[in-house]
Image: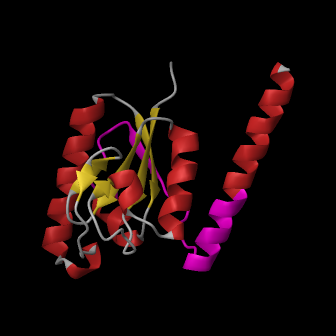
Amino acid sequence: MSAPLRIGLVGCGKAKLAHAAPACQLYTGSLFRGALQVASARCGVNVMVLSAKHGLVPLDVCMEPYELSLLRLTRCQREAWGELVMNELEWRFEVPEAELLVFAGAPYVDALRSRLPVGWTLVEPLAGLQIGERLAWLARERAALCAGARVEEVARG
């Protein structure tokens, strides 16, 4: 049996450009940038942004800057947000098994976890880490990924 499809989900950030831009460029914070790099290295093209305002956003979709966090939503609104995101994930990927690598805060993860389809799992690499610890973990992960890429280049000659 083949391995489940790996999908990277990167939580939006408060720091944004002052103008419209593709989702992969709109968010400018170090945590978002680092998580995007790690998610892209681990999941290839199967990476999307979790936006408090827009739900699931492909990296190339252009958006205006906005101010909204899931923390500002009621529990009922967060549940509806999670249902919307999971429905779209199932629709976009149409696979019986998937592994979601979620690089986002607890409100985003909690809104998704209870709605996972059978055969889908959720991995939260940054769980329990404070902001500084998250940044350090992402920096170590990026360094390891770069070192691995360099080893592969040398092996290919």
Magenta region, residue range: 113-140
Residue in the foreground of this view, choosing between 71 and 16? 16
Residue 144 position in % (x across, y down): 75, 49
Q: Which quadrant of the rendered structure holds the C terminus?
A: top right
Q: Residue 80: name its quadrant.
A: bottom left
Residue 95 covered by magenta stretch:
no
Residue in the foreground of this view, choosing between 118 and 40? 40
Q: How many numbered circles does the render carry?
A: 0
Is residue 19 in view from this perspective? yes
21, above or below 79, in the image: above
Q: Residue at x 51, y 60 (%)?
A: 33
Left or right relative to 101: residue 69: left
Left or right relative to 114: residue 133: right
Q: Residue furthest front?
A: 19
Q: Residue at x 21, y 43 (%)?
A: 88
Residue 84 position in % (x across, y down): 17, 52
28, above or below 141, in the image: below
Q: Residue at x 21, y 34 (%)?
A: 91
Residue 132 covered by magenta stretch:
yes
For the rendered model, the colour scheme is: secondary structure
Residue 77 position in % (x across, y down): 14, 70
Q: Residue 87: name its quadrant.
A: top left
Left or right relative to 99: residue 55: left
Is residue 125 in view from this perspective? no
Residue in the foreground of this view, choosing between 7 and 4? 7
Residue 143 position in % (x across, y down): 74, 53
Q: Residue 117: name its quadrant.
A: top left
